[in-house]
Image (cartoon, rainbow, N blue to C red):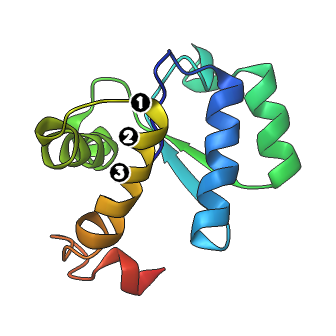
Amino acid sequence: MEWQNRPFTTRDAIRSHENAFEFFGGMPEEIVYDQGHLITVSEHAGDMILTAEFQAYKQQRKFRVHLCRKADPESKGKVESTVKYVKRNFADSRIYTTIENWNERCLTWLERTGNRRVHGTTKKRPVEVF
């Protein structure tokens, strides 16, 4: 996970992807996304139109995109649950000083706690899977 002290842009999202691939030592074949404005522009006849910048990145890196359906808690829950977990278990109990310090402390928490917790569905610890 990665935090910024300003709104994310598509370029920031792409950089964050690259940081995640480095962190995990590889890249998945498919990535699940909420329908965010950093990745999607609009919907046309049920097909989502990606931003030009993200479409070019996806084609360059050759991964599949799975977009959650709008207002569908079943498909969006996987994405939103992760965000909620981080916000409630890391961000809610710490005092912000600088963005660099916040990201360092977040990675420490992730190594110590977030990636060691047994996942409710997979029954595996993320640190063991990756």
Q: Say whether residue 23 is left or right of residue 52.
A: left
- The amino acid type found where label 2 is placed reads Trp
Above or below 56: residue 20: below
Front one among 2 and 100:
100
Residue at the (65%, 29%) spot, across then down: 12
The residue most toward the bottom is: 128
The residue that mark 3 highlights is: 106
Q: Say whether residue 104 is left or right of residue 85.
A: right
Residue at the (38%, 86%) spot, across then down: 128
Real-space Cα separation, disc 2 to disc 1, in angstroms: 6 Å
Is residue 86 visible in the rendered structure shown here? yes
- The amino acid type found where label 3 is placed reads Cys
Real-space Cα separation, disc 3 to disc 1, in angstroms: 12 Å
Above or below 16: residue 13: above
Element under disc 1: loop
Real-space Cα separation, disc 3 to disc 2, in angstroms: 6 Å
- The amino acid type found where label 1 is placed reads Thr
Q: Say whether residue 56 is left or right of residue 25.
A: right
Q: Do tag 3 and tag 2 residues touch (Cβ < 8 Å)?
A: yes
Residue 78 image position (x, y, % from top left):
30, 50
Quadrant in the rendering for residue 29:
bottom right
Element under disc 2: helix
Q: Which mark is residue 98?
A: 1
Above or below 100: residue 118: below
The residue that mark 2 highlights is: 102
Q: Do tag 2 and tag 1 residues touch (Cβ < 8 Å)?
A: yes
Front one among 109 and 37:
109
